[in-house]
């Protein structure tokens, strides 16, 4: 990990680190920061504007975001239609693609060089627990991490209204720490902000991902042409109880900060599956499933 300390010891590697490092964050105090801001709620979202404004205190903010809302597109990449870049201001660009498209176009075609930081958000609504698998907000930060850029996803609790100025303040303070202290290799931060005024927030907590269950069924209805259609709602939700979880922190009015790593390999389970290697090795004579065998 390149920290402020290691750079101080070897200042001549700063430029090459900036160009080639695929790993941790680093802090170059004398160079002006370049910060990439994106989201999945689209260019018009007030959460994006609040975040970009707050991060302006730390460096040059480049906004590259979807031209419309792309919530819950996850890590989708657009492969089957052309992408267009629409410049909306000096350093603000809207793209007709997904959050992950935006990150890639920003890095390869828009920014003058790699950013020192990527911040995605502020999302309208929390991204807790299993949400990270569906969330376009988090996926943009995952993509940044894959590309070697220290990345943060920021989401805000709320329903119809969102306290984005409080959220942006928390996001800026965490972003400043990331710039100063770096992130571990292949690790991003998933930040969630409680729906509280700044003064009533109960602190910042390091958390683990919670587990959630959707309790509402998929709604089945019939359209005016007599055809059945379905609606996935996802409004009734129950959570597993874990005092260290992101959900618990938000419930108690704290900012939740979950470190997430790219490598989801279950290392402890590898030994168990190694036994399958030999079972699967000479399986030509056992191609039928056990049930088929019984029938025969
Ligand atoms: Mn969203």
Image (cartoon, rainbow, N blue to C red):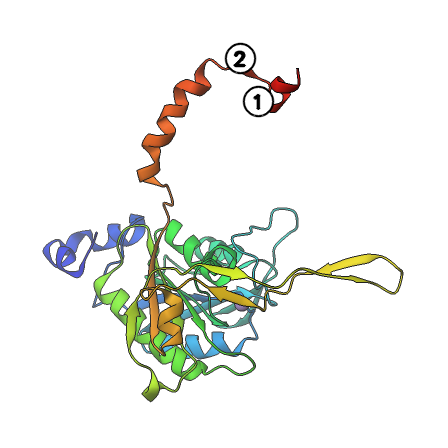
Give the label on residue 39, or none: none
* Mark 2 and mark 1: Cα distance apart in space: 14 Å
Which of the two discs, 2 and 1, sits closer to the camera?
1
Q: Quadrant of the C terminus?
A: top right
Question: Residue at position x 62%, y 64% from top?
Answer: 216
* Residue 267: image location, x then y, percent: 32, 39
Note whether residue 134 is visible. yes
Give the residue number, with chain letter if any, for mark 1: 290
Question: Residue at position x 28%, y 54% from top?
Answer: 18
Note whether residue 27 is visible. no
Q: Please, which residue is most extreme toward the left here?
A: 9
> Ligand 1 closer than 8 Å to the CB at disc 1?
no
Give left or right: position of 189 versus 286: left
Q: Residues within 10 Å of mark 1 (few under 14, many from 20)?
A: few
Give left or right: position of 150 versus 1: right
Q: Please, which residue is most extreme toward the right here?
A: 225
The image shows residue 296, relative to residue 170, as above or below, that is above
* Residue 289: image location, x then y, percent: 59, 22
Question: Residue at position x 19%, y 51% from top?
Answer: 13
Give left or right: position of 234 versus 210: right
Give left or right: position of 153 versus 161: left
Give the residue number, with chain letter if any, for mark 2: 284
SS for tag 1?
A: helix
The image shows residue 252, relative to residue 10, as above or below, that is below
- Name the quadrant containing residue 173: bottom left
Question: Residue at position x 48%, y 61% from top?
Answer: 212
Q: Residues within 10 Å of mark 2 (few under 14, many from 20)?
A: few
The image shows residue 71, relative to residue 6, as above or below, that is below
């Amino acid at each position: 990990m390149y920290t402020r300390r290691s750079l101080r010891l070897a200042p001549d590697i700063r430029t090459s680190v900036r160009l080639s490092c695929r790993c941790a964050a680093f802090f170059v105090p004398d160079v002006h920061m370049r910060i990439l801001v994106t989201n999945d709620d689209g260019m018009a979202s007030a959460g994006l504007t609040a975040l970009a404004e707050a991060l302006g205190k730390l460096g040059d903010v480049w906004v590259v975001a979807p031209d419309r809302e792309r919530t819950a597109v996850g890590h989708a990449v657009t492969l089957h239609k052309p992408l267009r870049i629409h410049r909306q201001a000096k350093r603000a660009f809207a793209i007709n693609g997904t959050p992950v498209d935006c990150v890639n176009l920003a890095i390869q075609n828009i920014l003058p060089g790699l950013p020192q930081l990527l911040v995605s958000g502020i999302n309208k609504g929390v991204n807790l627990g299993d949400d990270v698998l569906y969330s376009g907000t988090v996926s943009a930060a995952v993509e940044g991490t894959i590309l070697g850029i220290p990345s943060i996803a920021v989401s805000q609790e709320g329903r119809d209204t969102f306290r984005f100025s409080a959220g942006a303040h928390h996001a800026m303070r965490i972003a400043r720490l990331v710039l100063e202290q770096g992130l571990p290799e292949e690790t991003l931060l998933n930040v969630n902000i409680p729906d509280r005024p700044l003064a009533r927030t109960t602190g910042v907590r390091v958390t683990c991902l919670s587990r959630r269950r959707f309790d509402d069924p998929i709604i089945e209805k019939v359209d005016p042409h007599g055809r059945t259609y379905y609606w996935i709602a996802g409004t009734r939700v129950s959570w597993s109880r874990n005092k260290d979880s992101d959900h618990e922190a938000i419930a108690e009015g704290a900012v939740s900060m979950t470190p997430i790593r790219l490598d989801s390999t279950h290392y402890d389970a590898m030994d168990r599956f190694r036994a399958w290697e030999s079972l699967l090795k000479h399986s030509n004579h056992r191609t039928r499933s056990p049930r088929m065998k019984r029938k025969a």
